[in-house]
Structure formats: structure tokens, C-alpha cells
Amino acid sequence: MKIRKYAVVVLGAALVLFYGCRRNESSVPRRFSKKQIALTVWESLDGPDVFIKQAAEKYTEMHPDIEVDFVNVEPNVAVAQFQEDAPKGVGPDLFTGAHDNLGVLVGGGFILPSEDPEEIKKQVLGSCSRALTYNGTLYGYPVSAETYALFYNKALISENEVPSSWEELAAFVKNFNAHHPGKQGFVMDVANAYYTFIFTTANGNRLFGQFGTETSRSNLNTPDAVRGMKFFQSLHSAVSLPSSEMSTATADAAFQSGNAALHITGPWNIKNFSEAGVQFGVAALPSLPGESVPAASFSGTRAVFVSAFSEYPKEAADFAKFLISPEMQQLRFRLTGAMPSINTNVNSQYIAGFLKQLEYAFPMPSVPEMGQYWTVMNSASARIWDGASVEQELGRADMQISR
């Protein structure tokens, strides 16, 4: 009897093991199900997702033992979600984000330095490699360069009327609005410090200093910044819309519907405006009062970062480098309209305006204090537009950001 009991126990254990394995086969992570290696990439929708999928397909043709899976996580939430997920082992191998997140990502040990940094620096635009350098080390792989510029609707303003100074723009808007009820001569997101930064930059005044690293002083309340933001505030008398009606969504919609003559935005809107049938051009930003060259804009570098928690960091880095090859950069431009991160020719009537503006652009600082900058200056910009004291708002902003 003891022998027969033992046999039954062994047989039962074997059946449990067998069926348990069968049952678990379908729940095995995809990382191990079909390919030897599977990489997960977080990216956004509306173009970049298509790019990643097509690039992944091409890469797997070259490397059959590696598959690349796309997961939609938008860049504006990717960094926070990555910080939470990655240490738990459930984050991606690669994710995209703006270079101004470097301070947080590097300081927290979340991302790896770039593989073959000197080779990468030779391959990409200088503005991109500088933007992705933190404390002398290159991080990430730039997939696009970004800045914004002045869009103009050719049905509402001729090319020779496009203002080259902000004083000319203000005069144009007053005249245009008086003769075109229901339309706007100029729109922009006035509560977004990404754009209102423009007005703080006269005479070389730059956020956190010339290199964006002097965090003891924001330079937001200097005499140049105060004068510039007072001019920004004066535009309200010409535009006559409150900040609540001058958001990115409303400004984009006004231009896309043909109801705005001038708009400050970036290459990410080229496809949307073109598909809407708007005939438009792109010019460098107008010069600030007292200056003769385009006002400075923020420039950004969108990069793919390799997670420090990836099981396959070498393979992830190799795929990221593949994304900045000439073939892939051309593909990304065709799919998204974003400016390439390398020196490659693209067929676009709009690229010249952005390239000119890039000559005067200032890379967004990547220090951790940038998180506070966005929060504080977004609110301050809205209040200034709506009539608050410029000196008080900028003084308070400097104290909150530089403390």
C-alpha cells in the first residue's frame, strides 16, 4: 500500500507539473516567446509610432533574433512613469523624451550613457550633441531637432508683409483685427513658458546663464527680462483675448481653420496644417525691441534613451543608433515632419525657416530645476498676459526657481 500511495503521489505531481507548464505557456512574457530577444520602446502616437514600427520591422529583417515592440506612452508622462516602473522591472528598454529631462534621469541613475559617443557626436547636429551632454557625458540618441518659428497664412498675409520685428507684428495685428472681424492677426500659447521664454532673451539674457547651468540665478527678473515681458504684456491690447483663450489647442485650431494670420508653433504642426489645406510659410521669429536679429527660441532635442534597467542594453543601444542612420532619419521626416537630427537633405519648403531660427535658438537647460521653471513660469506668463505686475511676477518666479 505504501508503494502504491507513493506512485500515486508521484504521478499526481507529474500531472500538476505538466499541466501547469502547459497552462503557463500562453502567459510567458513575449520577451521569450518568439524571439531570443525582444526590446520594448515607449513612443507617442500620430507619426512617431508609425516610424518606430517601420524602423523595428526593418531592424528585425537585419537582426532576426531581435524583435522590437512599440508601446504608446506619451513623452510628457514618460519620464515620470519610467521613474516609477523601471526599478520594478516593468519599464521599457528604450523610451523617448526631451533632452531637458537629463538632469533628473542622470541624477537618478535611470539611463545609460551613449555607446560610441564620439561616433555619435560626429554623426548628429552639434546642437543635438550639446543638448544631450550632461556633466561632460553624452546620453541618449537624438532622433529629431526641434524649435519653433513664425507660421504665416499666405491667404491672409503676403510673404513681404511678414513682420521681422515684434513692433511690426503688433502694428500688423492691430490693423488686421480692425479689418477682419472674426479672425486674429496673431495667436500663440501665452501661458506656456516654452514660448514666452522668447521675451526674456534680449541682450543675450539666458535662463540659468549662457550654458543653462547656473541654477543659483534664473535670470528671469533681470532688466532685460522685465522689459521683454512688459512688451509681451502690451501685445494683449492688440490681440484682445485672455490667456484662457490663447492656449496651444485654441491657437493651433485658429490657424488650422484659416482664422489666424500668424502663429508661433513648431514642425510638429506641419502635417496637420497641410492636411487641413492651409497654404502657409515659415519664417524666423521677429526681433525683440532694440535688436536686429531673430529673437531667441528654445531648441529641443528629442532623444531615445536606453534604460539602465534593460536586460539588453547593448542591443537597445544598437537599435537606437539605427534610428539615427540617414535612411531612418529620412523616413522619420516623411512620417512626422520633424527636423532630422543629422545633416541630411530633406524635401520641404518649410525647413529653411526652422534652420534659420535654429541659428538663434538656445538649448533648453537640462538641470533638475527645469521642472520648477515650467510650473512657475507657465502660471506667471498667464498672469502677466492678463495684466499682473511684471516685476512682481518675475521676482516671485526667480525666488521659487532659484531657491
Image (cartoon, rainbow, N blue to C red):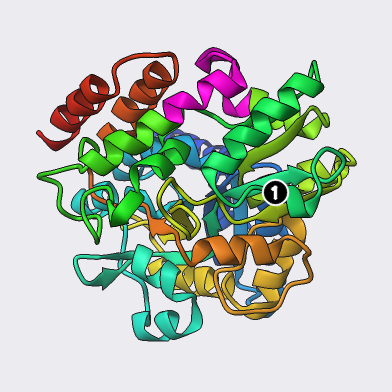
Measured as percent of width and height from the top left, residue 86 is found at 35, 44
Front-most of residues 157 and 34: 157
Secondary structure type for disc 1: loop
Three-letter residue code for mark 1: Val
Check the image and report above or below for 310 versus 84. Answer: below
The answer to which quarter of the image holds residue 220 is top left
Front-most of residues 262 and 58: 262
Check the image and report above or below for 119 versus 225. Answer: below
Tell me what residue is drawn at x 79 percent, y 27 percent. Answer: 259
Instruction: Tell me: 247 left or right of 390.
Output: right
Chief secondary structure of the magenta span? helix
Tell me what residue is drawn at x 60 percent, y 43 percent. Answer: 44
- Residue matched to label 1: 162
Measured as percent of width and height from the top left, residue 40 is found at 53, 53
**Residue 1 visible in image:** no
Task: Tell me the quadrant of the picture where the N terminus can be found.
Answer: top left
Instruction: Tell me: 138 left or right of 216.
Output: right
Task: Tell me the quadrant of the picture where the C terminus can be found.
Answer: top left
Tell me what residue is drawn at x 29 percent, y 39 percent. Answer: 225
Front-most of residues 307 and 260: 260
Measured as percent of width and height from the top left, residue 6 is found at 38, 37
Instruction: Tell me: 26 left or right of 242.
Output: right
Give the magenta range.
232-249
**Residue 46 visible in image:** yes
Measured as percent of width and height from the top left, residue 351 is found at 68, 64
The answer to which quarter of the image holds residue 62 is bottom right
Q: Confirm whether the magenta stretch covers residue 117.
A: no
